[in-house]
Image (tube, rainbow, N blue to C red):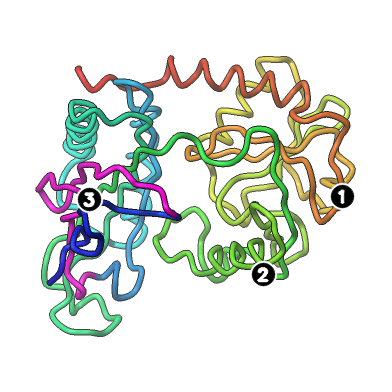
Amino acid sequence: MYKLSQLTPDGSIMLNGKKITDTILYVNGEYVKKSEAVISVYDSGFQHGDGVYEGIRAYGRKVYRLDEHIKRLYESCYTLNIDIGITQDEMKLIVKELVKKNIEAGIHDIHMRLQVTRGFKAQTGMHPTLNITNSSIVICVDEKPPIFNKDGIILITTWLKRYNPQYMDPKIHCCNQLNQIMAACEAIRQGADEAIMLDHNGYVAETNSTNLQLIKDGILVLPTLDSQLPGITRKAIIKIAKNFGMEVQERNVSISEFYNADEVFICGTVGEIVPVKMIDGKKIGTMIPGLITEKVSHEYKKMTEIFGVSIDD
């Protein structure tokens, strides 16, 4: 078995010519360096994408909306009959300890991917009876500020449809993301940042990695949750808009409505609030970011300070 650090002459992890921080991860009860982290090739996550995950961000010594993320993780596991083996409170303690260790190592802008799989298989095969261990718990940590260009991103609409509940319940935050990865590949081919995915009826669902919403005539309009994940950041934006006294509509939204919106933005834990400047070659609005998008983003920043769980409690 090789270690990732052996792949580069000085032991560094590189991406596009840039040195990536060798953060501290949690792997099945152990805290290890990213360059040394390993998991069995017979793990269900590697074999079949059989698991769930949460993207979680820390702001300083606080973990943003930790309770909500852990609750959603456990609900997804319950739906898939994955026994995590520890309580929600125990999981929260692990997350807080991991953040603390990384901060003590001088690491900031912490983004985590908490992943739980069905565990180790005795041999290859999809059937869960082949699993002979408890679930695997891995928390990846990256020193990664919010991604995407806050000056505005470009979207295209992909022909790939987002899963609908008849085939895969979008409320399950599962590790199998080939549907979205294929859409991301198309966005790259077309020189865009993200791809808009429609539902089976042709209405907008979400992008390949974020929730999507628009502003029209002072109204916040969001696609329904029929074919998308109920994002934690999306929920926060609805609350912000209502606090502003704005009307909020959750309904079927066509791509044409996004073309003609006053403002469009994406949202998610990994990127926060990001304005959209172009969709399918069509310019959006008259200024980027729009006035309401800017106000929402400012209020969201306040939320990251208020709704964080301290790692010192």
> Badge 3 is on which residue?
34
Towards the viewer: 105 or 276: 105
SS of the residue at dot 3?
helix
Q: Which residue is mark 2?
A: 160
Label 3 and label 1: CA atoms lie apart by: 41 Å
User: Looking at the image, is mark 2 or mark 1 earlier in the sequence?
Assistant: 2
Q: Describe residue 285's horizontal placement relative to residue 145 as left or right.
A: right
Q: Are marks 2 and 3 in contact (CB under 8 Å)?
A: no
52 vs 302, left or right, is left
Q: Nearer the viewer, mark 2 or mark 3?
A: 3
Residue linked to disc 1: 282
**237 or 295: which is nearer to us?**
295
* Residue depicted at x 24% and y 42%: 23
Instruction: Please give the name of the residue rendered at 34% of the width and 46% of the height, measured from the top-left corner.
Output: 20
Asked which quadrant contains residue 297, the reply is top right
Q: Secondary structure at mark 1?
A: strand
Closer to the eye: label 3 or 1: 3
- Note whether 106 is above or below 278 in the view shown: above
